[in-house]
Amino acid sequence: MALISVEDALERALWGLTPLDVVRVPIAQAHGRVLAEDLAATLTQPPFDCSAMDGYAVRAADVSALPATLAPVGESVAGARFDGIVGPGQAVRIFTGAPVPDGADTVVMQEDTEASGESVLVNAAAQGQHIRPRGQDFMEGDVLLRRGTRFGARTVMLAAAMNCAELPVRRKPRVAILSTGDEIVPPGSVLGADEIVASVSYGLGAFVDAEGGEPVSIGIARDDERDLADAIARAADADVLVTIGGASVGERDLVMGALARAGLQLSFAKVAMRPGKPVFAGMLGSTRVLGLPGNPVSAFICSVVFLLPMLRGLLGTNAAIVSQPAILASALPENGPRQNYQRASSTYADDGTRHVRVLSSQDSSLTAALAHADCLIVQPRRAPALPAGAKILVLPLAG
Amino acid sequence: MALISVEDALERALWGLTPLDVVRVPIAQAHGRVLAEDLAATLTQPPFDCSAMDGYAVRAADVSALPATLAPVGESVAGARFDGIVGPGQAVRIFTGAPVPDGADTVVMQEDTEASGESVLVNAAAQGQHIRPRGQDFMEGDVLLRRGTRFGARTVMLAAAMNCAELPVRRKPRVAILSTGDEIVPPGSVLGADEIVASVSYGLGAFVDAEGGEPVSIGIARDDERDLADAIARAADADVLVTIGGASVGERDLVMGALARAGLQLSFAKVAMRPGKPVFAGMLGSTRVLGLPGNPVSAFICSVVFLLPMLRGLLGTNAAIVSQPAILASALPENGPRQNYQRASSTYADDGTRHVRVLSSQDSSLTAALAHADCLIVQPRRAPALPAGAKILVLPLAG
């Protein structure tokens, strides 16, 4: 199969993808989840005109000439309002957040008063001041959070203030992660001469977790038809099956062969990208399959390019994957026939400008260099050389 | 007590703080945790010279004149190396990641060869090419991850490649969260006339979770000495106790009084900041206490200013809280006697410059506006007015 472009491959990988079903979670568990429906406030906030200060609720007419002496007639605190009406010449002690009593239209700051038991002397005041009007924050029915919002501290706080105890969010995508290869052993093993520690599967677990998915390790399959078939069967209820391996032609044929026998509808195999050329994708029933190369860097970059949009699509999130402007700190040679994802690190000028330098070694086996990069420079196919100082776009790396 | 500066308050809040003890977690659970010790590789990667390509392992001397015809004598695949020695005129089929056999010093790409059963015709080659030397990624003993690193996908992947099955990380700070106030009811309640939905506690839970702490809700205490004392007792084993409430003088006195009776050593009460003036902190035995105002925006900003550095200190993370350069999109009036944290939103110019605009209402009760801000403009005390276009620093808001 000829190499297809990253754009074509991505389109095929996401073909027919729709967000997962909606589940309701208690608000205490909403952090990190993606809102599945627009969320409207179920109450008006504040529900009543309330005081923005500790002080006295008064009638503006009574404090138009200062100083003014008023008679204290009661108290309004949050949770226990003053039930009466503030009449002419009267003042009600009031605390922040407490309802402004009927009759009053102004709050005088405590600092601007002198109180004795029987009277309150007001030294400064302005009509209507220090009152938060009913609905200043929001009105019942206001849509304050849009579907696709990923919940963080402030949006959870807002949803609670909207009196929403349960929130409609997307089910977490189940991502089955399968390592393959006779040479792969789990971390902590005493390594035989030709053995390699499984690392991509653990990195992917964190990657999926960070994006709000549910990673499920389904182990390490030997380069063996039966073992691969058994492992693939364990992914039957996954939304996504990610296979890792097939660095070599033989292994690759084995993994793709086992998937084909299980019924894989191949979407593409081999993409004009670097690293990551051997990546493939397809559908196995309703499970989306992504076949990653075994090289850690290739696997990670294919995850950024293909798995990330897949997860965001399944979650229906409105978070865009945004490139950021930067300036090349060193010249970039012309690019070959594959879209090139170069690992780079950034420094920032005083004005915030991002200056990026390509890491010296771009070999796709270098996990340490990848861990210390902070962005990718994406060079399109056949892109011309660029001098130091050129303006470019970079893809920031999180995690 | 007079207002103290934010800097003084922060110093007192963090006084004597040391990172929590070290626990070991399986690598599959390391995501989001903070590494407590420098981590050295326990193996050399790759452990042998290996092929970077699918192709043939050959002797450079045999391909110095091209085309060259060689005799295939075996195969080296990942997990099963070629045990013999590549002699003059011989070639070994090799796959990506497989050990380069003894005798060979060069790999020829498959694309540059034509193979029949009995011979391999090499059309292009270069001495030493397509070999990843032993240790190219890292050597055994190399410290590749520093203490204080928060694990993300790439660092987890690296730690796995370093053959570390368990990782020394900081225990998660236990943060007890206590709402206070007669007027506070949980989300989903049918609200009485003067009742307010608890929102800060839920936002804080997400805040603590996002920072790698363990939020523990200890409920809502009434404005009642006994109820407060019982709640405070439930926080005995917490690393941090955060109280929410005391928007009004009366409540505040109650909460601080209950803490004082429990043995609070007060570090400060009232800070020259806006919003957030009523914030207080202290020590209750070995538990750090942070007393947040009840206003959601005040509480959130005090969390950013005080709780975030507290959590990062307990976790021993090396993540700095970094201000970012920006340009004022609208003029900023001079500031008063308190450090001012203004909620703002950003747009980005084509060159990546951040332009920030202060949100029109800065009232500390506006949760909806807070949720839609993306940064804080921090105006020092008595800062002069700034015109539109002025360069400033902003504190980005996540979550």
Image (spheres, coloured by chain):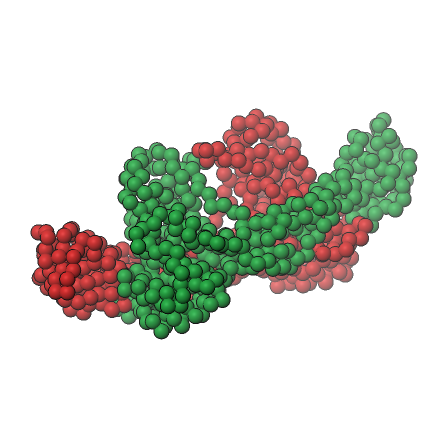
Chain colours: A red, B green
Give whichever of A145, A84 is nearer the camera.
A84
Marks counted in the figure total: 0
The answer to whether A168 appears left or right of B149 in the picture is: left
Q: Residue furthest bottom?
A: B226
Query: Which residue is at the front of the view, B64 or A366?
Result: A366
Q: Is residue A244 left or right of residue A377?
A: right
Q: Residue at x 42, y 54 (%)?
A: B13
Q: Nearer the viewer, residue B43 or A367?
A: B43
Q: Position of residue B188 (x, y in %)?
A: 37, 68
Residue at x 27%, y 68% (from the top left corner): A79
Q: Quadrant of residue A342?
A: top right
Residue B367: tell me if it is visible.
no
In percent of width and height, residue B209 lies at 49, 58
Nearer to the camera, A165 or B341: B341
Q: Identify the image quadrant of the N terminus of chain B.
A: bottom left
Q: Residue at x 38, y 34 (%)?
A: B391
Q: Is residue A119 visible?
A: yes
Which percent across, then down, holds residue A97? 27, 60
Q: Residue at x 22, y 67 (%)?
A: A81
